[in-house]
Structures are given as structure tokens and as C-alpha cells.
Amino acid sequence: MAFDIEMIKKVYAQMGAKVDKARSVLNKPLTLTEKILYAHLAEDTNEAFTRGESYVNFNPDRVAMQDATAQMALLQFMQAGKDKVAVPTTVHADHLIQAKVDAAKDLATAKTTNKEVYDFLSSVTSKYGIGFWKPGAGIIHQVVLENYAFPGGMMIGTDSHTVNAGGLGMIAIGVGGADAVDVMAGMPWELKFPKLIGVKLSGKLNGWTAPKDIILKVAGILSVKGGTGCIVEYFGEGAKSLSCTGKGTICNMGAEIGATTSTFGYDFSMERYLRATNRHDVADAANEVKSLLTADHEVYEEPEKYFDQVIEIDLNKLEPHLNGPFTPDKATPISKMRAEASKNGWPTKVEVGLIGSCTNSSYEDISRAASVAEDAVKKGLKAKAEFSITPGSEQVRYTIDRDGMVDIFKKIDGVVFANACGPCIGMWARMGAEKQEKNTIVHSFNRNFAKRADGNPNTYAFVGSPELVTALAIAGDLGFNPLKDKLTNHKGEQVFLAAPHGNELPPKGFDVEDPGYQAPAQDTTNIKVAVSSESDRLQLLEPFAPWDGENIIGAKLLIKAEGKCTTDHISMAGPWLKYRGHLDNISNNMLIGAVNKFNGETNKVKSQLTGLYGEVPATQRAYKKEGIPTVVVGDHNYGEGSSREHAAMEPRHLGVKVVLVKSFARIHETNLKKQGMLGITFANEADYDKIQEDDTFNFIDLKDFAPGKQLTIELIHTNGSPELIKANHSYNQQQIEWFKNGSALNLIKKQNG
Ligand code: F3S
């Protein structure tokens, strides 16, 4: 499972010169973020990029994928005609394991239920040089932190909480599968150069306060949108006083403020963690380039000059927080929770406390939570609420078990779930959730949107540190403030819970019997990627057909979508997630959430073949069968939301030829281009109103498709003469080649010979 020390050394060897160049180009001292970004530019350039404006190509060092998103990404990668991934890559089987009984039983069930997905992932990773962390090995972000993250590195991952690796001084960013495919295939990866938020931490955490409280406080200050388009860089004495895994928790929840990512400068806590996780050579290499792995000292002296926004938090004064319900930025200090709950009518009886997840399952987290549980048991208390622990990795689980913590949790009737996402992603068979009763749970995860954990819209979920969650589960009371309040034990005595204590790292070292890692095969000749033609969850992809070089004539309107049309409207999630690896099956959700302008309804469009109204996917399949091209028309910011590539692949697969909108969300526009689709915008927005339900479209100068040149569309209305409108596009020459070849992957394959 070796991380690639040679790759890391290469990054460090080149970093000094690249950082010096960036400093002279920008003519100012550099933040850590700028150092890492400029050290990973795909092209050698003298350009000083504008934060928040410039689009820049980068070469990330690593790719990580979880099992839900990896399926389509790897099916696509197989289309690129490569023998091996271009950068070190891992896949982690963590999202598909449902928490129900306990780790052993739930894991066994998952291995049966998801067998075909796991067999596919195991074979495809082995064939293409990708490391595979098998079901039960752990949650992607914890495993990455333990094995792969390194200071100054750049990583992309197909999961929003990839940002967790910022705890080890990386720039680690969550992306869609299409981006991962590009990087695995050796293409650069594009990002809008982010703005910078500096968070200065002074003082030191004490008593009940934990790293989690820092990010809960930051979320309260910035809100769920406050970090959008920004990288958050933490610094100051307070930052140095935090453990590496504590830093990971803070960076992890940077996703909850919309930040591109977050990071910390290299310090002794990171060195300790690298050595404890058996990466002495990475620590030694990082120590040699220390000055490159933090911001220039001038930045720390006058941060306002170098960041777009600066926030200061005094850790001495920080209180434990609980954020929620229903949104992670609703921050309430624990001392105010009782009053807030009664003011807002939040149920105060805590039904379940859940600790762990990718956000908070370090040895330190678990040992502090265990200290609370142990103290409670000693003082004659039991947990009033149900209690569960989701370890982030087998290494953590094995070590906390060895060190007696699992036994402590069992004394308060705690259940250890599998090392997997489980309740955090809603893979939790919570008894009685279907009754949809109003109730409260507390957890140390990151997201607490309605229905997230148990599918019940009436579950009020609050996010707190593992130690606070443990205390609240013991008290069974949301308003319990362990700093001030006493609890009554079985003898009727009033007792305080002692403040938590723990170990940053295991005093006896980490240990594990079977980490659950499968290395890629050395000889791949006989490896066949396991995809059954009978499967309804997986389907090998066929390359999309290249453009025939002709104008598109006689295209029919499939739908004119009105208002918001996000990637969720185009390719709905929920039950459809199951089909993420099966393009034809998941295409049955295509545009079913989009509102038809002509009747105000969803999933009801007129077929020009029959004159009847029907569901969007079925209507489109009928056009495809007849070989009739179609057009989807949309409003502003079409395709906003996630970077889900299915939203571009489905229409392409079902034969839609053109998406014509007032404006695109940029990522979706790029995804359409990558899939060989024509994604264009009205030159005159008001022309949207000219599109009628029975229109036919002729793209009469597509043969002259060229960068910067408008396209002309001839609209044939049923009741009138043809009308000409103009469309703009943003295709550059390379992207036009994608269109001509049928997709970016087709082009890569062709270039590979
Ligand atoms: Fe999994 Fe929840 Fe993290 S879904 S990756 S444990 S945010």
C-alpha cells in the first residue's frame, strides 16, 4: 500500500524553483495556498493569475475515489485506451455499507448485496494500476490521511470531503468523476483560481473544547456559502497547537461552508502524525523543504494584506458548540442550547448519539470520547440515548479495540458499526425512522440536512465534537452543558462529568492485522474487468459516435425547461444512485425533475411523433429509435449544483444533440463538451421566448463550427415561416475536437493510437 515517496520527493525537488518564480511573478510574499497551487501549474507561465477570476490548469499528484462515484469514472477511464492511470490513484469501498446491526453482520450483508460492484472495482483497479481499499478497510478520507496525504501536495477526489487531507497540509479538492477521469488519463485539471480566506487561531483549546468547535464556529461566521470559491488557510500559534487529525476535522468541514478546500502549514503535529503512521521518509523529506510548506513569514505578520478576508478566533475563549438542526452553519454555544431549543421548539430528548465518520474518528477523537464514557461508568451513569461508533479505518478500529476503548463504549451499550460511511450518508437502517416522528439526534459527522442520516425529515440532527456527543448521549438531553450541569446517577447522587482527556496518538503505536488493501496486479494480462451483461447496476460503456461533419437538421424540441434546472433536476439522486454504474438504467431519470415551460409540470413533455404527452426519458427514447435528433432548451445557470457527469452523459446517451440555454453553470457546460455534446447559449436571451412546443431546429452553419464564431439556428414553427436566431458558444479548438470525435475520451484514445 506504499505511498509514492519518489513522487513526493520529485514534487519537493521542483517546488523551490516554482515557488521562487511565483513570488517574483506576483511580486509579493506568498501564502501557503499560492505556493502549492503555483507549484502544481500544468504549464510553465509568467502569468500572475487573478484570484476569483482566472481559470488555471493544474497537475494534481493524486486521485482518490469512493465506490459510489468511482464506478462511472472508471467505466469512462476504460474508454481512454490507457494501460494504467497516469497518477497514483486509490478507490475506497466505503459508501455502500448499511449500518444496521453491528460491524461484522453489516459488512457481511454489504459484501453480498454489492458483490457485483465490489468485483468490478476490485478487477478494474487491479488492471489499471489503482490501489483498492476493500469494504471494511475504512472511510476514504481517513484512509487517505493515514496513508497518502503529504504536506504541499495536491490531490483531487470524487467526494466533497476530499478536503479532509488539508489536515496534512495538502490542497485537496472534491471534484466530479469526469475531472478524475481527465487526471487519471494524464490530462491537466482546471480550476478557477480561488480567493483566499485566512483564519488566525490564537490561544489553545482547553477542557471540553475540541478542533470540531473551531470549524463549527467558523461555519457560524461564514455560513454555508461563505467559503464559496475560496481556499481557507489556517495559521497562528493556535493552529500549531492542534493535532494533525484535529486539523483534518477542521478542513473536512470546510466543505460545509462551500470552500474549495482548506489547509494548514506544515508543523510538528504533522511530522508526529507522519511518523506515527509509519511515514518517516515523508516526514524527513518534508523537513528538508519546511519553508516551502508554510506561508512566507510576512503573510503571518500582516495577513490582511495577503488574504481576501481574515477571521480571528481565540481558542482560549472558544466554547463547545452544537450546530443545527438541518444546517451545519446554525451555530449555538452549548451554554445557550437549552434556551435556543425551547425558543425554537427543538425536541430536547436525545434519542441517539453517533460518533466517528470521516470527520471525527481519529485515535484522539475516540480516546477523548472514551474518557467521557469511562468517567460516566465510574460515576454510576449509563447512556440514556442509543450510542454508536463508526471508526474511520480498520487501523483506528483495531488500535482502539486493542487499547480497551471498545470495551468502555460497550459499557454504555455502544455499538460499533463497520468502518464505513454508514449513518453519515444515510446508509442507516434506523429502527422506526419510517414513522417519521419528530426526534433529536446528535452526531460528530459533518452534514445534518433534513433526511441525511436516517431518511426521516423530522429528525433534528445536531453536529458536535465526539466528546460532547458522548456526553449528550449519556445525559439524553440536548440542553445538557457538561461544563456546568450535573447528572443524577443510579444511586441518586448528583455528579459532574470530568472534562475529556485523550491521546493525540496511540502511546503503543498504531496496529492493524489486515488493513484491507489490495495492491494492483503487476501482470495485468489475464485480468478481465468483471461486468456481467446481466447486471442492472453496471454496464460497460460504448464510445459515443463521432460527429458526422454535417449540419444538424430537423431536430425536435424535447423539453423547454423553465427556471432552476440543476444537475439534480437533470439526473436525480436518491434511489437512482444505485444505477450510477449503469448508464442506460440511470438514463431513465433524465430531466425528470425539470419543469416543462409549456405546462408547468415535471416529467411531462409533448412528443412530436405522436402529439401525446409522456415522460421525458420515454419520449426521448422514441426519438432516438426513429433516429431523430433533439434539443433541450433551458433557462439561466442550467446545470448548477454538483459536478455529476451523469447529467451530461444521459442526454448524450439517449440521443439529445444540443443543449441550448440562456446561461450554463460552468462545470456542467464543460461536462457537456467532454461528452461530445453541443452546449450553446442564446446570443439574445429573449430568443428563449421564441421557442415553441412543436418547433424544429436546423443548425445551418454547424459545418463551420469554429472558436468565437456564432452559430445560426433556423427555427421552424408549425404556424409560421422560419425564423433565424443566433447562438454563442465557448468551445476552444481543443473542445471542438472533442465534439468532432464524439467525446474527449474518444480523442484521448485516438491520440494514444
Ligand atoms: Fe462518508 Fe460521510 Fe465522510 S458519507 S466520506 S463519512 S462525509
Image (cartoon, rainbow, N blue to C red):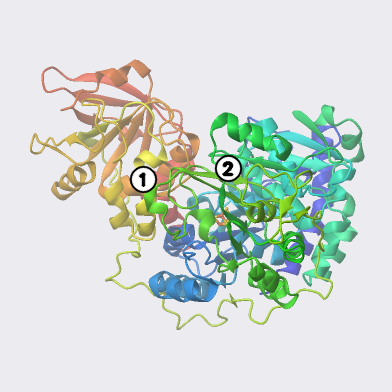
> Residue shown at 24%/23% (left/top)?
691
Residue behind label 2 places its C-beta within 8 angstroms of ligand 1: no
Q: Is residue 228 visible?
A: no
> Residue shown at 87%/66% (left/top)?
284
Q: Is residue 24 above or below residue 624?
A: above
- Residue farthest front in this picture: 492
> Residue shown at 33%/48% (left/top)?
650
User: Pointer 1: what residue?
Assistant: 571
Q: Quadrant of residue 157?
A: bottom right
Gap in angstroms between the C-alphas marked 2 and 1: 37 Å
Q: Does residue 606 appear left or right of residue 422 in this picture?
A: left
- Amino acid type of the residue that numbered disc 1 sits on in the rendered structure: Ser
User: Pointer 2: what residue?
Assistant: 348
Q: Quadrant of the N terminus?
A: bottom right
Mark 2: few/some/many CA within 10 Å (<14, 14-19, 20+): some
Q: Nearer the viewer, residue 60 or 119?
A: 119
Q: Secondary structure at mark 2?
A: loop
Q: Position of residue 327 (x, y in %)?
A: 56, 38
Where ligand 1 lies, by quadrant? bottom right
Q: Position of residue 570 (x, y in %)?
A: 35, 41
Q: Earlier in the sequence, mark 2 or mark 1?
A: 2
Q: Position of residue 36 (x, y in %)?
A: 75, 47
